[in-house]
Amino acid sequence: MRAAQRSMGIPVSESDYPQWFSEFLADRAVRKPSPHTAKAYRQDFAAIAELLVGDRAQMAQLSPADITKDAMRAAFAAYAATREPATIRRCWSTWNTLCVFLQTSDRMTTNPMSMVGRPKMRKPLPKGLGADTVARLLAAIEGDHDSRRRSDWPERDRALVLTGVLAGLRTDELIGANIGDIRLTDEGGVIHVRGKGNKDRRIPLEQSLLDVLEHYLDSRAVRFGTRAEGRSATAGFAAWPATVALFVGSDGARITRGTLQYRLLRAFKKAGLNDQRTRGALVHALRHTYATELANSAVSVYTLMKLLGHESIATSQRYVDGAGIENRKAAALNPLYGLIRQPRQS
């Protein structure tokens, strides 16, 4: 088993890593990275370390002295041959962070990563799906009501899509959400989101979305019966323990990244819309839709930043820059258009 796991690029214990890399992981753990980020540290390290030592079985023998400018350039050149630009940049960032750690802990005199190239990332303006596309996605999901496959669960999938486009949650935020994160108010409700970089935010929810979520939870109680975790006899959100996962898989456990991505990809394909989303964007396509619809409604960039949980206002500004409706209306106010509308002199 260990040999098979190594062949797939998965170190199986801390002993597979050099001691100094384990110390790096411990140092990063203090910063509370997401499980996705922590996994990426290990994957990115193993991919380059194997190229440096020539054999993953010898990875634990890698020394900081082996991490030279020429060695890293050669390793990243080989790594980049079969990877997408975004993956290369993430790996570069992991190794840059690692080399900074080695430098500050006096294991390395200079950081070679500044001399290792990385691809520039295009930053296209964010693109939302639009109301018609979202409606077709929901219609495709509704068609699953006639399905006998247990993995098909239209009430949950509809709630996932609508939470994505009406609350703008990221993948990890949807996965990590608990039922108790939703608080009911006189105006509707609020969901408390534990966001990227441990930054919390609160997103207002309208009653119509709360109704969709309650309908999904009622279907969940029917689906799992006595296995519905600690649910009381009452209805609605109050029937569930606060710490229970908001979204679950067909096994009743907290939904996984793989299940979430698969259910959305299936909906896109079933609706014939798979070519209308940005490559690699599933949950993020829903989040982009949330952001662009708000930007088109003339929401201030500061409000957009708060709702999306962005660290920089510049990130939120890109949605405003790409808000086609708002920009078109503003451009149409240019008084020089009057020159075109004037009748031509013969």
Image (spheres, helix red, strand yellow):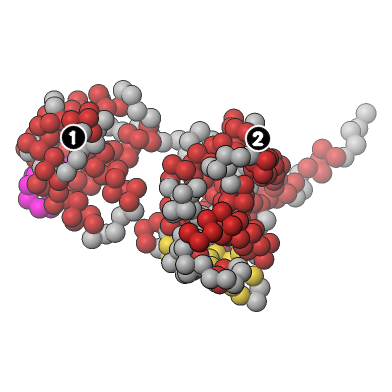
239 versus 252 height, above or below: below
Q: Position of residue 173 (x, y in %)?
A: 45, 56
339 horizontally vs 130: left or right: right
Q: Which mark is residue 2?
A: 1
Q: Nearer the viewer, residue 336 or 324?
A: 324
Q: Looking at the picture, which amino acid does disc 1 mark?
A: Arg
Q: Nearer the viewer, residue 330 or 81?
A: 81
State which quarter of the image contains the C terminus.
top right
Q: Nearer the viewer, residue 10 or 244?
A: 244
**Residue at point 31% right, 23% down?**
81
Majority secondary structure in the magenta region: loop
Rendered image quadrant of residue 9: top left
Q: Which residue is mark 2?
A: 271
- Does 211 appear in magenta? no
231 versus 269 height, above or below: below
**Mark 2 touches mark 1? (CB < 8 Å):** no
Q: Looking at the picture, which amino acid does disc 2 mark?
A: Ala
Give the residues drawn in magenta, as a range. Answer: 102-111
- Badge 1 marks a residue whose secondary structure is helix
